[in-house]
Amino acid sequence: MSASADHHRHSGRRRRAGAVLAAVGLLLATSACGARWDEAQREEVLASRTSSGLAAGPDGGAGTGTASRTRTTTAAGGGGAAGGGAAVDGGGTAAGPTEGAAGGGEAGPAGGGAAAEGGAKPCAAPSDAPGVTDSTITLGSISTLSGAVPGLGASSEGAARAYVAYRNATGGVCGRELVLKTADDGMDNARHRSIVTEMSEQALGIIGGLAGGDAGSAETVTQLGIPVVSVAISKPFDDSPVTYNVNPYFADVNQPLPKFEYYHSQGVRKAAIAYTAVDQTRSEINLRQKPQMIAAGIQVVAEIEVPLSTLSYDSAARQVANSGADYLFFLADGSISASMARSMHDTGYDGLKFAEYLTSYGSKFPELAGPGAEGAVSTIRTAPNEDGGSSQEQAAFLEWFGRIAPDQPADTFAADSWAASKAFIDNLEALPAPITREALLAQLGAVGDYDAGGLLGPIQLGPQASKGCVVLMQWRSGKWNRLTPDQGFLC
């Protein structure tokens, strides 16, 4: 269906001009059958999560899956209003309803997918689309739970399950109950492709999740015309005309990020950039972050590559201090960032107005960095959990994610997956005619601004363009606090 998919892709969608995804090396680093990743390739995944200022998630939490391919979960219950049953066993086998959410038809937060009061919606009409029956709609979700980085997508998978449970608890969608098939790709390209092929006949489309092997399925999802709304790791998967990424790129790489404009307004003029020395991280720095700093009027006075084998970050910290920089931008995972923060603290240098450790929010950075964490800044694209349910959607996310995936952190991986699942299902429900994949792709392509009900900094979903909307978080007095803005997003 590649021709029809291209036809229905929103005409305003641009290729991500000049933006080389930090994870593009995934294709270079893995064979067609999907090799295991080393530490450098793990950094590529972390770098890809920084696009448009996205913070990374937990430092490799425990995986829950085994080598099994797919498993099915539902939130079945009387009248389609069960609050329970979306949790899955940890063994990776097919699982039916289990404990994990409030049972017995408990109603969830308002704003779910109940049928319109005036009668059945057009999407409730009979449909012969894959995964659609008169009573159910089956969806797929693929995450990395095992392999070289076990648990990378565990919170993302939990959020997809949580969103399905939430929508079933509030009435289902299009007069039907949602069924979710989840799968672990093991961070393997061929395995991801095999899962997609299997799901193509069983599921209407793919929602949420975070899968390190998605490069293996770029051509497959396009050829089969499978609608996907997720966070793409590889550039080929992201570039597929049937993939809608909730973390899209800027159309202009020389456009300054709102956060850099904020730093400039606070007196920042000289930046020191430090990052792990892998090609993909260099691309993220040189083709995105650095040009956007310069565009905001910030001079880069030091650029420091830190080998992955480095055991001490004292030398890098001294270079920052000697540069006279008033702003530090550091790109590595949470534990490496903590080491750099400790070394910066030990220098006694007090010339920094801001020290941004991009991936520190949602990681173990504060406890590992000790006193070096004080004042550290991190940039995120979703409403911080510290808002405590500032929007109805965030309240639903925090409540239902806590029910369905209580062993996982409600991090930005999870929030992205919830936002992606919501985008898919809301647009499914908005179809003006019976359900087809082609109609859903057209519906998604027509979406302009999208903010997942206030959970996500606004993006252009159909055209696939970032608006640079972020929240700057700062670690002060033992907790994360909003630095700017006081509420909402800095856009």
Image (cartoon, grey):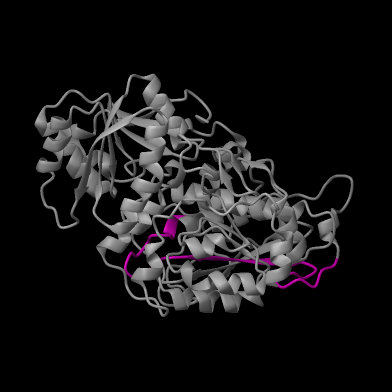
The residue at 63%/42% (across/down) is: 450
Can you give x and y, in whole percent of width and height, for residue 184 in the image? Answer: 46, 70
Using the rendered image of the protein, determine whether residue 329 is visible from the camera's viewpoint: yes
Can you give x and y, in whole percent of width and height, for residue 32 in the image? Answer: 42, 78
Residue nearest the viewer, comparing 138 with 223 = 223
Q: Picture quarter containing residue 132? A: bottom right
Residue furthest to the right in view is: 118
Q: Would residue 140 appear left or right of 353 to someone viewing this image?
A: right
Using the rendered image of the protein, determine whether residue 410 is visible from the camera's viewpoint: no
Magenta span main SS: loop
The residue at 62%/56% (across/down) is: 164
User: Any magenta on residue 129?
Assistant: yes
Q: Is residue 248 above or below residue 266?
A: below
Q: Picture quarter containing residue 435? A: bottom right
Can you give x and y, in whole percent of width and height, for residue 329 in the image? Answer: 29, 37
Residue nearest the viewer, comparing 18 with 453 = 18
The residue at 30%/58% (across/down) is: 279
Magenta range is 126-155
Residue nearest the viewer, comparing 394 with 467 = 467
